[in-house]
Image (cartoon, grey):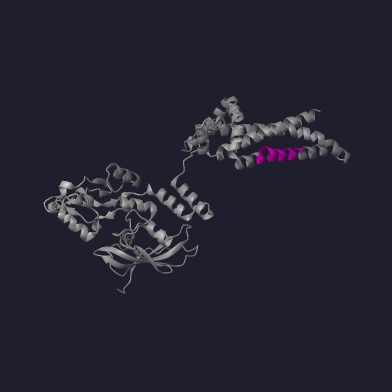
Amino acid sequence: MTELALLLLSLILVAACGLFVAAEFAFLTVDRNHVESRAAEGDPGARGVLAALRTLSTQLSGAQLGITITNLAIGFLSEPALAALIAPGLSRLGLDGAGSRAVSLTLAMLLSTTLTMVFGELVPKNLAIALPERTARAVQAPMRGFTIATKPMITLLNGSANRALRRMGIEPTEELASARSPEELHFLVARSAREGTLPEDTAELVQRSIEFGERRASDVMTPRTRVDFVHIGDSVADVVGHVHETGHARFPVLDAETDRVVGVITTRQVLRVPAADRSRVAVTDVMDTPVLVPGSIDLDSLLGDLRDGSQQIAVVIDEYGGVDGIVTLEDLIEEITGELEDEHDTPVTARQTRPGTWEVSGLLRPDEVEEITGVLLPEDAEYETLAGLIVDRLNRLAERGDVVDVTGEDEEHRRYPVSLTVTGLDALRVDRVRIDVGEALPDDDNTATTAPTTDDRR
């Protein structure tokens, strides 16, 4: 009877071990956002789970302590009891004395360990992973009660572990971070698209939205060399002429003497002036105050500045106080939705001429080239565009026919030889580039040709 009582107590301890294991995995895998939402609605079970999650490190330490204690107790109680029940059977088989005791203890240990592993650890672990919230609700009350009862021991053990971590330069934390980094979100969205749970166009929109806050004004601006200005001494009639010549609807107003943008004028303001008065009314009489931003401002903040200023154009100022370029509201929208074409846009910024070859604008960024070709070109703080990459590699101003060879990577980190050929110039700026992407390099090929070469056929 004593052996049976010990085995019954051991089974209770196996169940307790299962509770601790289930609590550990349920608290780690439960969707905290959903729990917080249910708790805000007044769900008492969700409130209990949330309370446990707010002291997660302590709860996990309590679970580990409970698992250790129950495992030791199960071994201490069940193995002698099982050995005592097994020994008579071995005696009937002719095995007596020390041999019988050794075999019975070995069999008892194997049986006890197997039962504990299966029903005390694996079953509750798999249950918690499959049904994390339901499991967390079921175990949170006894788990929190055990943690309170053993708090002195948990505090001592946790404190010792935390001191060891701090000696290694790591600061412990009580809660598991619930926020996801941009890199994690990128991975989750890409995986969802590959698995078909998220439509590709939706996945692309989400990816662009994540990247939006990571970009700076200098990444998306139209450079000064491509901006059409009106001048501080111009009349509204002069602006009408600029509208007809360029097709643009908004212009920065430049004071050439100080190289400062003093305002922004739009066709809406021009049309408010009677036609007969336009030659007599100066742009300074009708222009708006400009939104001036540094090139380092992130796009989220820039969008807020435009909204606060009720403007659709911001002027980017460089570190020396000069005009670096402009960013329009359309530029910001395109960063999320992709290229938007209107009657004023250049019709084609990139086109594929044959497999592996594209003709593109030199003003594209490396990440935009990746969207077109599937291959990411080398990025560096020294340049922001494809034209900048070419000039950086050439170490001089580019000429038509110049060729730069680099190595690119796709999203699976396969490497490709890429040739960049200058096919068009706009004054001194690289305007058009032909991109030729070769076959993937072998995995063991670590040679990357980055030195510039020039093609003598011009």
Q: At x 66% / y 36%, what residue is drawn?
A: 18
Using residue 252 as the reference point, say whether residue 163 is left or right of it.
right
* Residue 285 appears in view: yes
Which residue in the rendered view is the most extreme toward the bottom? 457
Decide whether residue 210 is among the magenta residues.
Answer: no
Who is closer to the viewer here, 126 or 456?
Answer: 126
Q: At x 88% / y 39%, what residue is drawn?
A: 92
The location of residue 244, given as percent across then percent down, is 21, 60
Count up the numbered dots: 0
The location of residue 152, given as percent across then percent down, is 57, 25
Decide whether residue 121 is among the magenta residues.
Answer: yes
Who is closer to the viewer here, 438 or 312?
Answer: 312
The location of residue 31, given as percent across then percent down, is 53, 39
* Residue 96 appears in view: no
Which image quadrant is residue 375 in? bottom left
Which image quadrant is residue 224 in? bottom left
The location of residue 214, given as percent across then percent down, is 38, 48
In the image, residue 184 sits, relative to residue 3, either above or below, namely below
Q: At x 50% / y 52%, what residue is drawn?
A: 198
Using residue 78 as the reference point, say whether residue 394 is left or right of it.
left
Q: Main secondary structure of the magenta part?
A: helix
In the image, residue 447 sits, relative to residue 29, either above or below, namely below
| Stretch of the chain drawn in magenta | 108-123
In the image, residue 435 sits, relative to residue 147, either above or below, namely below
Using residue 326 as the reference point, say whether residue 100 is left or right of it.
right
